[in-house]
Amino acid sequence: MDPHLLRTYVTVARLASFSEAARELGYTQSAVSQHIAALEQDLGAPLLTRRPVTPTAAGERLLEHAGPLLLRLAAARADVVRLAAAPPFGVTLVATPTALGPHVLAALPAAGVTLRVLTRDDIPAAVATGGADLGLVDGIAAPSDPLRLPDVAPLRTEGVGEETVCVVLPRTHPLAGRAGLRLDDLADARWLDAPDAGLPLARFRTATGSTGFRRALRYEGTELRALTALAAAGHGLTVLPRSAATGLPGAVAVPLTAPRVVHRTELVHAGALRGAAAALAERLLERGRRTAGRAGSGRAARDGRSGRPAPPDASA
């Protein structure tokens, strides 16, 4: 299929209008109609009804394929341009709110970085298509296990840190005085679902193998301060990496001790890095190795006293 025709079809289907699609794409309405007719002839099936403009059953199926196909084409173009271009002096970094831990912030240079906060699902696509040089994604995983990312392009990932997962509760909560919490202790709890600010409930369920976590309130924002204020006010519990969960007004952070999971942060990039992007990536990875080493030394000392493994922590 001609990608130009496919892009025209996706635009018409999204806008439900040939004239609006022509205006957005910079074509004449006649050219848009010709694109759709050529694509329908190529596939041997009608893709759109005309009044109103809606996808047919075959058109709906094509839309399922079109998004990933066009994304991979954009990623391929960006990868070639990135390889051929001169090394940039600036670097664009995209990250989730909870990926911006102390060791990440300490690695940022004094100038030359553009930092954008995006959702977890948007970061791989931004890196693949050239919208960013580097990405930082995070999530809950078993210790040393990689995160599962959307397969949008041949991206490379490297771990830059693991940290203890904490449950954030109001100071008045009956379990707020515990030294640690097991998931079984929270069977009847109500939770905040904040997929773009905290650690999403759906992925928490997957990582812990639990079917629980009753949602009390859904927060569709990226501000950690707003999320923790909701938890402190008693609207539901949430889970955060320890560095983001300590010192919160009106709330306490209690480590999750069972099942044993960690908050993991990974660096995402496409192909070989050069210039400012390569320098920042090395700083991030070096900070991650350094904090992991300090956490490992601390664990070894604690293990010698208690005889039990302590949870990993890269929040130093």
Image: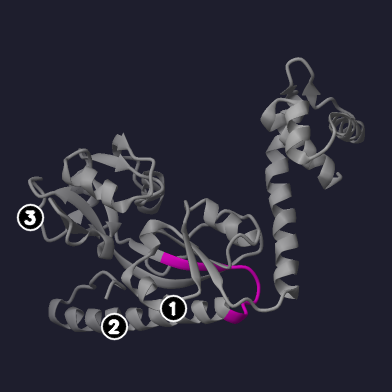
Q: For residue 30, what is the image quadrant?
A: top right
The numbered dot on residue 294 is: 2
Residue 271 colored magenta?
A: yes
Q: Residue at x 23, y 81 (%)?
A: 298
Q: Could you say whether the residue bearing mark 2 is in a helix, strand or loop? A: helix
Q: For residue 305, what is the image quadrant?
A: bottom left
Which residue, given by chain and number where applicable, does mark 1 sit on? Answer: 109
Front position in the image: 109 or 255: 109
What residue span does the magenta drawing correspond to?
Answer: 265-275
Residue 127 in the image: x percent, y percent? 59, 62
Front position in the image: 260 or 122: 122
Packing grade of label 2 (10 A; few <14, some 14-19, many >=20) is some
The image shows residue 291, relative to residue 10, as above or below, that is below
Residue 293 colored magenta?
A: no
Residue 220 in the image: x percent, y percent? 39, 40
- Badge 3 vs badge 2, beta-carbon distance below 8 Å: no
- Amino acid type assigned to the residue bearing label 1 in the image: Pro
- Badge 2 vs badge 1, beta-carbon distance below 8 Å: no
Q: How is the image coloured?
A: one colour
Which mark's residue is nearer the viewer, 2 or 1? 1
The numbered dot on residue 177 is: 3
Q: Could you say whether the residue bearing mark 1 is in a helix, strand or loop? A: loop
Q: Earlier in the sequence, mark 3 or mark 2?
A: 3
Q: Residue at x 43, y 73 (%)?
A: 160
- Amino acid type assigned to the residue bearing label 2 in the image: Arg
